[in-house]
Amino acid sequence: MAYWYGGLSIKADYQELLAAHEKAVKQLSLVEARYDDASQQLTNAKLGSDIDREAVNDVRTTVSEHKETINQLNEEINFYKGLMAPTERERGLGIRSWEIYLGSEPNRFQYKLVLQQLALKHTVLKGTVKVNIVGRRNGVEETLSLDILSEQVDKILKLRFKYFQYLEGELIIPEGFTPDRIDIVAKATSPKAVTVEKQYGWIVQK
């Protein structure tokens, strides 16, 4: 099963986008404060005369988790900034990200594709996107389209959004097929005809 979502899409406006950006900025401020506190705790623990190694490891883990959250929030903030005020070079249809995660079985995976439109004035973007998984079977290179590996996915997926749109679902890798990379081709037909392509390695997130 695959699902298309138009995040802040046709019914969304600039104010909603701005609110999402401000929320991410506030979250970042809170997490940065927690990160500073945890870092100080770690320093104090290391300087203590009676070091509790387990406590130090716990604090170190907390620091690492906060740092990861900060990186994620910074990425989210940059995403919103790009949507609201793109540079001349960044404008137009873009393939923002492709992510894949382990599923319930060894050959099942969860995926998420995010596309975006960067513009000074957002109008509804229409077009299509095609996703191919390239790999090898019996030593021979083979290309499988997403519609073959994921239920209820058309061979060419339609795009219709103002800010960003994402597709998520489950894909099943057939026995004997070893994925190598993902080839994505997105084409906008309006407001301006443009084609963008991007490749991703087969990197499975935990």
Image (tube, rainbow, N blue to C red):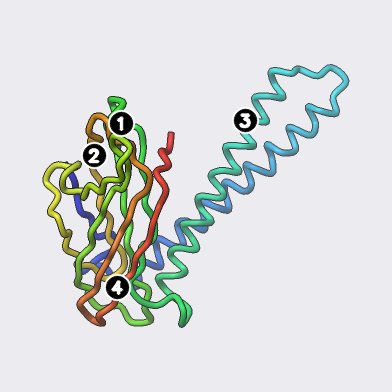
Q: Which mark is residue 170?
A: 2
Q: Disc 4 marks which amino acid?
A: Thr
Q: Name the residue under label 4.
A: 195
Q: Earlier in the sequence, mark 3 or mark 2?
A: 3
Q: Which of marks 2 and 1 is nearer the N terminus?
A: 1
Is residue 60 rendered to the left or right of residue 138? right
Q: Mark 1 points at which residue?
A: 103
The picture places residue 10, in percent across and down from the top left corner, at 21, 69
Q: Name the residue under label 3.
A: 61
SS under mark 3: helix
Q: Which of marks 1 and 4 is nearer the N terminus?
A: 1
Q: Disc 3 marks which amino acid?
A: Thr
Dot 2 and dot 4 residues touching (CB under 8 Å)? no
Q: Distance between the residues labelled 3 and 2?
A: 31 Å
Q: Nearer the viewer, mark 1 or mark 4?
A: 4
Q: Residue 77 carries which label?
A: none
Q: Disc 1 marks which amino acid?
A: Gly
